[in-house]
Image (tube, helix red, strand yellow):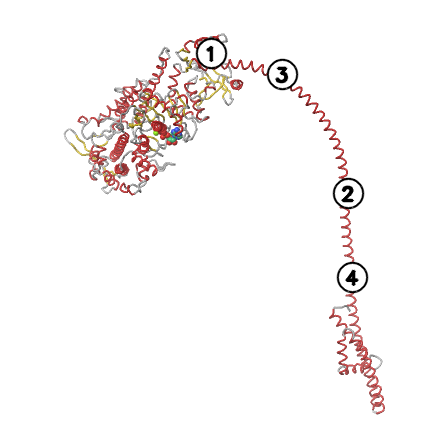
Amino acid sequence: WLFAEYQSRDSQCTRVWIPDPDEVWRSAELTKDYKEGEKSLQLQLEDETIREYPIDVQSNQLPFLRNPDILVGENDLTALSYLHEPAVLHNLKVRFLESNHIYTYCGIVLVAINPYEQLPIYGQDVIYAYSGQNMGDMDPHIFAVAEEAYKQMARDEKNQSIIVSGESGAGKTVSAKYAMRYFATVSGSASDTNIEEKVLASSPIMEAIGNAKTTRNDNSSRFGKYIQIGFDKRYRIIGANMRTYLLEKSRVVFQADDERNYHIFYQLCAAASLPEFKELALTCAEDFFYTSQGGDTSIEGVDDAEDFEKTRQAFTLLGVRESHQINIFKIIASILHLGNVEIQAERDGESCSISPKDEHLSNFCQLLGVEHSQMEHWLCHRKLVTTSETYVKTMSLQQVVNARNALAKHIYAQLFGWIVGHVNKALHTSLKQHSFIGVLDIYGFETFDVNSFEQFCINYANEKLQQQFNLHVFKLEQEEYMKEQIPWTLIDFYDNQPCIDLIEAKLGILDLLDEECKVPKGTDQNWAQKLYDRHSGSQHFQKPRMSNTAFIVVHFADKVEYLSDSFLEKNRDTVYEEQINILKASKLPLVADLFHDGKDSAPAATTSSKISVRSARPPLKASNKEHKKTVGHQFRTSLHLLMETLNTTTPHYVRCIKPNDEKLPFRFDPKRAVQQLRACGVLETIRISAAGYPSRWAYHDFYNRYRVLVKKKELANTDKKAICKSVLESLIKDPDKFQFGRTKIFFRAGQVAYLEKLRADKFRAATITIQKTVRGWLQKVKYRRLKAATLTLQRYCRGHLARRLAEHMRRTRAAVVLQKQYRMRRAHQAYQRVRRATVVIQAFARGMFVRRIYHQVLREHKATIIQKHVRSWLARRCFQRLRGAAIVIQCSFRRLKAKRELKALKIEARSAEHLKRLNVGMENKVVQLQRKIDDQVGVLSSQPGGGAVGRLHGHLKAGSLVPCSCRVLMASGPGSCNALEGFRCLLRKERRRWSKGRGETC
Ligand SMILES: Nc1ncnc2c1ncn2[C@@H]1O[C@H](COP(=O)(O)OP(=O)(O)O)[C@@H](O)[C@H]1O
Ligand SMILES: [Mg+2]
């Protein structure tokens, strides 16, 4: 661990914080020692860039020193040795971003950074874990603060208060709710009335009527509240009481872009369709002027109808009867209708009218049970009473609208007060209250581009609270010093009293404002002028150069420029008496009750809701002093009352910080955080701490930590206190830098860091010596081991290498043989393949050539056959022609010869003898022929084509061919062509035809 710790300290040279426009503060390291009188510092930033940091020689203001790393992430900021803005910011940032710790102590203040994410640190088990524990024993938590308050209430028998402050959206209301939940859980209720449930149930009601969506917070409380939770002797909850401050009434009639009116209006509109709300004649929120000016009437992730149910349940739980609830909702609905009343300007521009048929005005009057005609008249007219006479005056459109808006605001404020009164009644107990814990949830310091009366009051309240805080811290410091018997030298701390006096003292800003309000023709500008005349000498008051209507107040947190426009109007906050009188005469008891003279609905609670009624009578004749109180006056009174209460209690402070404006979880914008830390006084606490002796060490703890700085022979002394004293005196030369208390040593800022540095240096020197020796020894041992190991390794390696070479050679040879065989085989196979292919190709080629020759021969052969047939056909034709011609010639010749013969024969034939001889010869020949034919027929009929021969034979037998044969025989004559030859010829023809039919070749 020694090495680990001091290794990390190697890099710890002098580190500082330098201002940065983006990150506010940036860490840097000194690269060169600084010598007094030098004009700049050589710095290296965290991103390794080198920068020269100029030093103002006159002020000799060196940059802030950075704390040792050991102190970063501390639970308590005051434990930091260097206490300044960058250290605080860095510590908060590291805790928030790296460890997701949203709570950090800063002395007695709990700093809570809004995580914008639900964290699992608020369960019942966590409450019980914190219950009974000491504040320092557990991680910082709102429950630890609540437990501390609860414990101190029991231990010191003193009332307590938890003051939660911060910007809008920083988490005040959530923190206050957690604190109340803590009390409700750990204390339990004294009776069966479940009072703690009622205390918690007041939240949804107050949120419905007093919270609204703003650009900064979807559920922004538009009023301040102080809830006192009462406990009995056994520290069980018995009741509660609530005081409210400065309800933002202007929101009822006006909302900026993207903002909403109070939630209850939208909740009621979302439930308008319920049968019990038919008579309210409501529609959706977009339809009403007072709920639609911001644009979007819904909030992401919020169901107004559902929330309305919760509000109603809370009302029921707090004992508000259904009938009363309906009346409350009637009044709220009536305000919406009032906003929609159409006012028409008359031509003269001096008067206005409202149509008698105006639905919204009828609804308004009906819901509030007031007379329509009266209301219609007094909305557009007012009464003026002078000493001598009374007369009714018309009003311009702007005046009427203003008066109407003032009436709406007034009704809402009265109702708000009435509800607070009722909640208080429900939480009131008849049991004797032994002590209480108050939780104050109040808006923090505010500054906008344009600041008006509201911001002025808020900042005034914060100025008072800061003063109370300073005095308290101061007092605590003093007590601690006394306890430790340390001489109390006055610590300079920021005193808010001059600024408070500027605001509230006689002839202060508020006083002059009230004066101006009393002047009948008083204007904002006159008032501003009076302020300039009266206060320009004050160091907390300034007049802006460019304006005659604005003024600047130098508050503890910042300079704020206020625009005096409408201060008078807002301070007067008047409504016309005639309108109020109509409401007083309402048939609805609740409405009459709200506006009844002197019967303020909740006198203690609604200090903010008292209002002056613009009487028609001249100011001097004012009878009711109560009504003359201005808002500023009331606020001042309520603030005094609050301060009185707080001063009688032990305060606990919670400062809520909004880490970014985008509402993103665990995103830290240093600029915004620093603004708020300044505004909420955390840095002032730090300053007070730093001005005195901020670091404190018990003697025992100091001895344990810094024993290393003590010389050996001094350690022999057994008195630890004496050792501490002697060592400190030798180490820190300036005796003002520390003080010895009874049980603790007190150090000025930076001394612990100095001691830490000495301790670190000592450790570093010792570490370096130890490291030097150990490293030398380690290196020697390592070298010997390495040498032996190297030799062994070499031996093995070389043997291994030789073996590997032999093996390699063997393998190479084998590979060559294998390659040879393989290559041979491959070549052989290739040759075989080529050979086979060649043979195949040759076979095919030869076949092809032979086929070509064959086809040629075949073609020639066929041509020969064709030629043969053609030639034979030609020869035959020629022959037949020739034969025909020969026959013709023969015939002619034979006829000639026959004629001659005939003539001779005729002559011979005339002899009978001759004829007889001829016949006998003929008959023999025929018989011979017949026989020959029969033989022939017998041979043929056994051959193919025998059928035809048979048929021929039949014919011959039948004698049908006889004439032909006779003709042939006669024509051919003996010896030239006989009948047999003719038959043969016939037979050949017949056979050829038969063969053709059978497809045979000839
Ligand atoms: N401790 C917390 N854990 C988680 N969310 C928180 C916490 N504190 C505040 N928030 C968130 O911030 C929002 C604003 O807080 P709220 O208490 O209403 O602000 P403020 O009262 O200061 O205007 C809450 O609605 C919630 O979402
Ligand atoms: Mg709030």
- Between marks 2 and 3 in the image, the one whose residue lies nearer the viewer: 3
Residue 828: mark: 2
Residue visible at 17% across and 27% down in the picture:
621
Where does residue 936 sit, x and y in percent of width and height? 81, 78
Instruction: Report how far apart the C-alphas of labels 3 and 1 lie in the structure.
Output: 46 Å
- Between marks 4 and 3 in the image, the one whose residue lies nearer the viewer: 3
Where does residue 929 sit, x and y in percent of width and height? 82, 81
Q: Nearer the viewer, residue 32 or 598?
A: 598
Question: Which three-letter amino acid code belongs to the residue tagged 2?
Answer: His
Label whose residue precedes the other's in the sequence (1 or 2): 1
Secondary structure found at label 1: loop
Label whose residue precedes the other's in the sequence (3 or 1): 1
Q: Are marks 1 and 2 in contact (CB under 8 Å)?
A: no
- Residue tagged by mark 3? 780
Residue 860: mark: 4
Label whose residue precedes the other's in the sequence (2 or 3): 3
Residue farthest left in this picture: 388
**Can residue 449 be seen from the camera position used here?**
no
Label whose residue precedes the other's in the sequence (4 or 3): 3
- Between marks 1 and 4 in the image, the one whose residue lies nearer the viewer: 1
Dot 4 crowding, Cα within 10 Å, few <14, some 14–19, many 20+? few
Secondary structure found at label 4: helix
Relative to 364, residue 751 above or below: above
Question: Which three-letter amino acid code belongs to the residue tagged 3?
Answer: Lys
Where does residue 703 sit, x and y in percent of width and height? 45, 13
Label whose residue precedes the other's in the sequence (1 or 4): 1
Residue 36: mark: 1
Relative to 671, residue 367 above or below: below
Label whose residue precedes the other's in the sequence (2 or 4): 2
Res 485 quadrant in image: top left
Question: Which three-letter amino acid code belongs to the residue tagged 4?
Answer: Glu
